[in-house]
Amino acid sequence: MGATARDLDLNLLVALDALLDECSVTAAADRLGLSAPAMSRTLARIRTAFGDPILVRSGRSMVATPRAQAVHPEVKAVLDRSRALFAEGRALEAARLEQTFTLVANDLLATTLATRLLPRLQAQAPGVAVVLLPEGRRHDGLVLRDGRADLEVRVITAPAPETRVEPLLADEMVTVVRAGHPLTRGPLTPAALAGALHVTTSRRGRLRGPLDDALEAVGLRRRVVAAMPTFAAALHLVATSDLVAQVPARIGAPVIAPLGLAVLPIPLRLPPIEISMGWHPRHDNDPAQRWFRDQVRTALTDAQPA
């Protein structure tokens, strides 16, 4: 770094984090409550301290340099630990908490969390905001490590080695169809289920899933005519057609009910859906992070039947 220890200003790390998150001087200034000229001067100081341009112009936007990309996770880690140091030994006052938490979840879990979590937060901690990010097309093991998210809530099958994982709930898949669908006229049998036209949910575009294995085990095959990127898209398609879909029963309830869909038990043995919460160990002892994990845990526990 170009700065000596005597010249070091740790406030520059706060500004650097905002600049690299936003890749915009104006957006970073808004986030920190500064003027754009003041943020530009801060960026100049950061460039001098690091001996690197940090952000460079690319067309109409700005992009981070390789050096900036490399140090960004370290910057977030230092800031997280600094906040934890100041918070240690003090009781958390949720009503006075001013913080944004970022969480990765699929659209069904995001809807459930928004439905059950946000009212709790608004009542207990009105200064808290939540950013819900979708799962990526490929599993991104760095999303927690580099600080882009505080939590991931999903089926966690291959976490990064350092990730803390806590099981939250086990759900079961059910079949959903529109009200009045022919499958609602009697008990659902494996043959009737296989004879229907299906839509799957897969952000990778997969047409096959555990239901196919279960059907083939009893000598049946189904026809899948579409794969949708989100559960919401699949369920809206089901609501206006004779297609059928499978969704997790508990976490799907906030979406299934408003659409007036009929829920049918699947007459086959399918593996349970294990939903877990994952976070980076640097957040283990941070009071605000622990409090937020408690809120998420309670919100999803409420999704389970009594």
Image (spheres, helix red, strand yellow):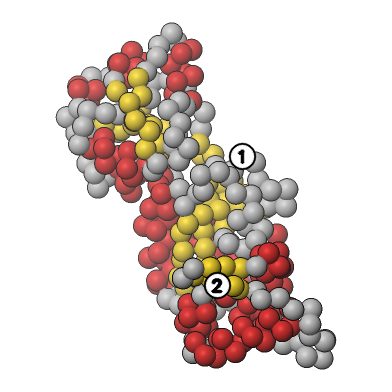
Residue 9 lies, with reference to residue 266, above or below; the image says below
Residue type, label 2: Arg
Mark 2, Cα crowd under 10 Å, few <14 / some 14-19 / many 20+, is few
Q: In the image, is 130 to the left or to the right of 186?
A: right
Which residue is situated farthest in the right direction here? 5
Q: In the image, is 165 to the left or to the right of 241?
A: right
Question: 61 or 145: which is nearer to us?
Answer: 61
Q: Quadrant of residue 227?
A: top left
Residue 201 in picture, x, y percent from top left: 40, 36
Residue 206 lies, with reference to residue 136, above or below; the image says above
Residue 72 in picture, x, y percent from top left: 67, 68
Mark 2 touching mark 1, by CB under 8 A?
Answer: no
Secondary structure of the residue carrying tag 2 is: strand
Q: In the image, is 247 to the left or to the right of 44?
A: left
Mark 1, Cα crowd under 10 Å, few <14 / some 14-19 / many 20+, is few
Secondary structure of the residue carrying tag 1 is: loop
Quadrant assignment for the C terminus: top left
Mark toward the viewer: 2 or 1: 2
Residue 127 in picture, x, y percent from top left: 45, 77
Residue at the location (45% across, 48% down)?
Answer: 106
Which residue is situated farthest in the front direction here? 59
Which residue is situated farthest in the left direction here? 180
Q: Quadrant of residue 12?
A: bottom right
Q: How many marks?
A: 2
Q: Is residue 205 visible?
A: yes
Disc number placed over residue 157 in the picture, else none:
1
Residue at the location (30% across, 16% down)?
Answer: 195
Residue 6 lies, with reference to residue 217, above or below; the image says below
Q: Which residue is mark 2?
A: 57
Residue 58 in picture, x, y percent from top left: 53, 68
